[in-house]
Amino acid sequence: MVKVSHIHSLRLRAVRGATTVVHDDTSLVHAATKELLTAILTSNHIEPDEIISAVFTATPDIRSAFPAAAARELGWTDIPMLCATEIDVPNAQPFCIRVLLHVEREATSPQLRPVYLREAVLLRQDLVTA
């Protein structure tokens, strides 16, 4: 019988992020999405194999590309992803891409911090650190 001296306890966590593009263009959507995902992973010390799934939304004025396609370009080929359209609320931030990442982490890991880039910092100024 093998005795385990240390049992790791994993927990499902989630982290949000958002960014914007200046107009609807495939290359801009892909670049902004990659920048956002890279920033979330870097600032939270997340490894791609810790990601369980990703849910992307885009405002109705973004129709040129799926944000998940940009994630696949980063090598996220085994991660389930879903794209949806944000609710079309009057005066909402235009040309905005959001993501909710589900991550499996050690239960004792620090809380994940959201990342807001470009004009998306206006969405949650209470969460953006200088």
Image: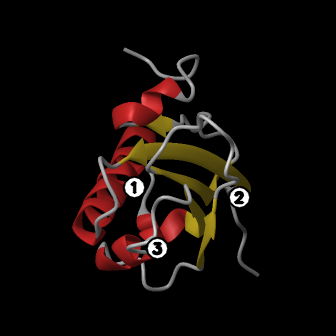
Quadrant assignment for the N terminus: bottom right
Q: Amino acid at mark 1?
A: Leu
How far is disc 3 from disc 1 in space, using C-alphas?
A: 10 Å
Q: Nearer the viewer, mark 3 or mark 1?
A: 3
Q: Is residue 107 left or right of residue 29?
A: right
Find the distance from the CA under tag 2 to the CA under tag 1: 30 Å
Q: CA distance from mark 3 to mark 2?
A: 34 Å
Name the image quarter holding the C terminus: top left
From the image, tell me which residue sits under label 3: 68
Residue occupying the point 45% across, 53% down: 46
Identify the amino acid type marked 2. Ile
Q: Earlier in the sequence, mark 2 or mark 1?
A: 2
Is 126 positioned to the left or the right of 118 in the image? right
Which residue lies under the disc numbered 1? 37
| Residue 35 position within the rendered picture, expressed as x and y whole percent measured from the top left | 29, 52
Quadrant of residue 102 in the image? bottom right
- Residue 86 or 45: which is nearer the viewer? 86
In the image, which disc is placed on residue 7?
A: 2
Label 3 Cα crowd, 10 Å radius (few <14 / some 14-19 / many 20+): many
Compared across the picture, whether 80 is left or right of 130 comes to: right
Q: Is residue 104 above or below residue 96?
A: below
Identify the residue shown where x is 41% and y is 44%.
19
Direction bottom: furthest residue: 78
Q: Nearer the viewer, mark 2 or mark 1?
A: 1
Residue 53: image location, x then y, percent: 61, 70
